[in-house]
Amino acid sequence: MPLDFPVSLTTLDNGLRLVVNEDHAVPSVSINLWVEVGSGHEQPGRTGLAHLFEHLMFQGSELVAEGEHMATLMAQGGRSNATTSFDRTTYVESVPTGALELALWLEADRHGHLLPALTQTNLDNQRDVVVEEKRQRYDTVPYGQALAHACRLVFPEGHPYHHTTIGDMDDLTAADLDDVHAFFTAHYGPRTSVLTLVGDVTAERASELAERYLGHLQDGTVPRPAAAEPLGPLPAPVALDLVEDVPSQRLYLAFRLPAVTDPDFVPVTMALDALASLEVSRLQLRLVRREESVSGCHASALGLASGTSLGLVVLDVSEGVDPADVERAVHEELEALAAEGPGEPELEASRAETERSWLEALASFDQRAELLGRAVVLHGDPQQVNTYLDEVMAVTAEEVRAAAERWLRPGCAATLRYLRPPVADAGMP
């Protein structure tokens, strides 16, 4: 039986899509503005701009001084944040009901009037912030470049997902003010945006406020590119060995998966659950508990829109164990899953965990707003938040087996191995 969150979807004359979920449980409203621009929309030689704007959007606009956007919301008891991914950039606020109009005015000002305040000084400052972020989060931490390496192994050069959201620092350094202004104009506008309001507001009131504060925004965006052609599984295995001083030796097995909207996507995510993500998963039972050859493992599916998604299996190799032995064991379990499919305990555990995590997310106004915006952009219908669990519950063991056979074979894995340097012989000077 589908869930029954009441949701409405309307479109303003300027193209802005408005999603509303009325919920008066607490006197607050979560605001989520999903903009259809991420690192997957960047051009070669101009990477990192989508993520850069996540920073620039908090640096002042025509009517709001630098730093005042967040400070103004905080003074009203609200909070604000933003994230960037391959397919989107999302701006989020959570405010008391009485501050909703203020939050929408602030959002409209920076989305409609950012460029007059986007100066060379702001650009230089935030570019430096991003360079430091990359150094701290990716360059100087163990396994920090794992996702970037996996994307380069799985997606061919020129593919929208060949590079990650942080981008190339040489590209970012080369971008001038004209490049940045042009990127904003091409990608930020009502037609590329979905505004979702969840909480203490009616659909009628939300529509009135959206029209008042954002209905005047003009749109100069370019049409969203067509999705890239779907990629099948890798035709042959590929691997990359990285010898680094890491806390433990680690294996990443990366796979091409179908797009998040493909009928195969949910079954293949359940196959990854059966493989490694649950307490009853076969790698957990065999490698973590019985053989103790790995100290931990997990699997995940990053659902992406442009033709092809990314699957990852991650294993931390126990001290004194040869990573090659672990890799062989994983291959054996992949072959078994493709041949036999999941057992009923694995299938039931996957369904139960999916239901738990989905309902937990929907219990939060912020996460519910995110999922509603995502549903509109990726599935064309906010009701997907109500029907998703029914889709999961309907998946059969044979569908999971077939998805594993197609997408998760050892022969189509890209393997990233983090290996420690050889220990020097104690007898050497």
Image: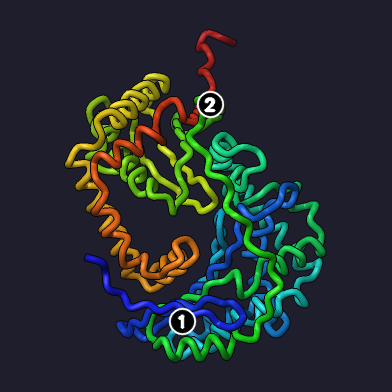
User: What residue lies at 57% left-to-right and 45% top-to-bottom?
Assistant: 229
- Asked where in the image residue 72 lies, by quadrant, the reply is bottom right
Residue 106, percent across and down? 60, 82
Mark 1 closeness class: few <14, some 14–19, many ≥20 residues within 10 Å: many
Relative to 265, 304 lies left or right: right
Instruction: Give how far apart the Cα atoms at labels 2 and 1 are.
Output: 47 Å
User: What residue lies at 66% left-to-right and 53% top-to-bottom?
Assistant: 132
| Residue that carries the numbered disc 2 in the rendered image | 239
User: What residue lies at 31% left-to-right and 64% top-to-bottom?
Assistant: 387
Viewer-proximal residue, 359 or 170? 359
**Label 1 amino acid?**
Val
| Residue that carries the numbered disc 1 in the rendered image | 95
Viewer-proximal residue, 323 or 220? 220
- Asked where in the image residue 55 lies, by quadrant, the reply is bottom right
- Asked where in the image residue 357 lies, by quadrant, the reply is bottom left
Residue 75, percent across and down? 53, 84
Viewer-proximal residue, 60 or 355? 355
Relative to 234, 367 lies left or right: left
User: What residue lies at 51% left-to-right and 31% top-to-bottom?
Assistant: 234
Does any portion of residue 246 appear in the rendered image?
yes
Relative to 190, 123 lies left or right: right
Mark 2 closeness class: few <14, some 14–19, many ≥20 residues within 10 Å: some
Label 1 sits on a secondary structure element that is strand
**Label 2 amino acid?**
Ala
